[in-house]
Amino acid sequence: MAPFGIEVVGQVQQIKWIAPIGHRTIEDVVVQQYFERSPPFAILSALVIAAALAVWLCTSATLAAHDRQLLTLAVAWLVIPTTLIVIWSALVHPVYTPRYLAFTAPAMALVLGVCIGALAIKPWAAMALVSLFAVAAAPNYIRAQRNPYAKYGMDYSQVADLINAKAAPGDCLLVNDTVTFMPAPMRPLLAARPDAYRKLFDLTLWQRATDRNDVFDTNLIPEVVATPLSHCGVVWIITQADKSVPDHEQGVALPPGPLYGATPAFAVPRDLGFRLVERWQFNLVQVIKAEK
């Protein structure tokens, strides 16, 4: 892993949006990293582990050699990568985020499996414990993991579906990178479903990430694209969502809303005679159709 680690360290500037180590890190490690932010599952896991430790320490029950070996491997799998990355983030440069350590979650499953095996004398007891874990996981699975914005609030698929259904070949596209959420910028949205945007004339693309050996494509500011924009009849504008305006509205000349209205991405099309005729709000993103 050393060559990979060296390569990663050499590119930390690409993840400068990651927050420094703080009190939130404890929650991220204990609840998010292993249990996908499901407190009931985390609490049940802690109880099962504590009960198994009590059995091993306070009774005559002992771990079989193969279980001890498996538990040692799993604990090392849990502790070593997390500790190294958290220490590096605290002392050198923030690189810790729970999803980067998702590969440690199977180790937690192994720990829980060994602990359940220690507690469940009869097969039905093991089945009951596993069923209890399923019940504890169900609310988070249904409400968080299966909702439309389950992946860190991203609405990339919803935006791509809209563009695919509503935009016509040859329409123009303006991506507004003036956003407040992290990780910024807005342009990675296009990389998630590139086929949906190929029929549009992308005005603000400057340099592709693959050409500059970086994570994100770069975006031109709206003032630079005023000339090609003036030749467009319809422009689709992708900008940050604004909860102060309706989820969907249509009209002859819609107001821009406070977030979008304060940006050059609104001022430049407005000065060229574009009117906002339809708007869709998602979680992080709003899509606006503008016509001359």
Image (tube, helix red, strand yellow):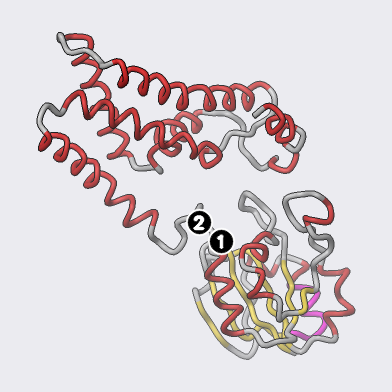
* Of 168 and 117, the residue lying toward us: 117
In primary-sequence order, the first of circles 1 and 2 is: 2
Element assignment for label 1: loop
Direction from residue 141 to residue 14 in the image, left or right? right
| Residue at image coords 52%, 27% | 82
Element assignment for label 2: loop
Q: Quadrant of residue 71?
A: top left
Question: Where is residue 113 shown, x and y percent of the image?
Answer: 28, 31
Direction from residue 95 to residue 36 in the image, left or right? left
Q: Is residue 206 above or below residue 184?
A: below
Which residue is tagged 1? 284
Question: Where is residue 42 shown, x and y percent of the image?
Answer: 32, 35
Q: Which residues are magenta?
A: 266-274
| Residue at image coords 33%, 52% | 141
Which residue is tagged 2? 153
Q: Quadrant of residue 207?
A: bottom right
The crowding category of the residue bearing disc 1, from other C-alpha atoms within 10 Å (few below 14, some 14 to 19, many at least 20), is: some
Question: Where is residue 140 shown, x and y percent of the image?
Answer: 33, 50
Q: The N terminus appears in which quarter of the rendering?
A: top right
Q: Is residue 134 above or below residue 167?
A: above
| Residue at image coords 52%, 22% | 80
Query: Do the residues bearing badges 1 and 2 touch, measured as CB atoms within 8 Å?
Result: yes
Give how far apart the Cα atoms at labels 1 and 2 are: 7 Å
The crowding category of the residue bearing disc 2, from other C-alpha atoms within 10 Å (few below 14, some 14 to 19, many at least 20), is: few
* Of 124 and 108, the residue lying toward us: 124
Q: Tag 2: residue type?
A: Gly
Q: The C terminus appears in which quarter of the rendering?
A: bottom right
Question: Where is residue 276 shown, x and y percent of the image?
Answer: 66, 82
| Residue at image coords 67%, 68% | 260
Q: Is residue 55 above or below residue 239?
A: above
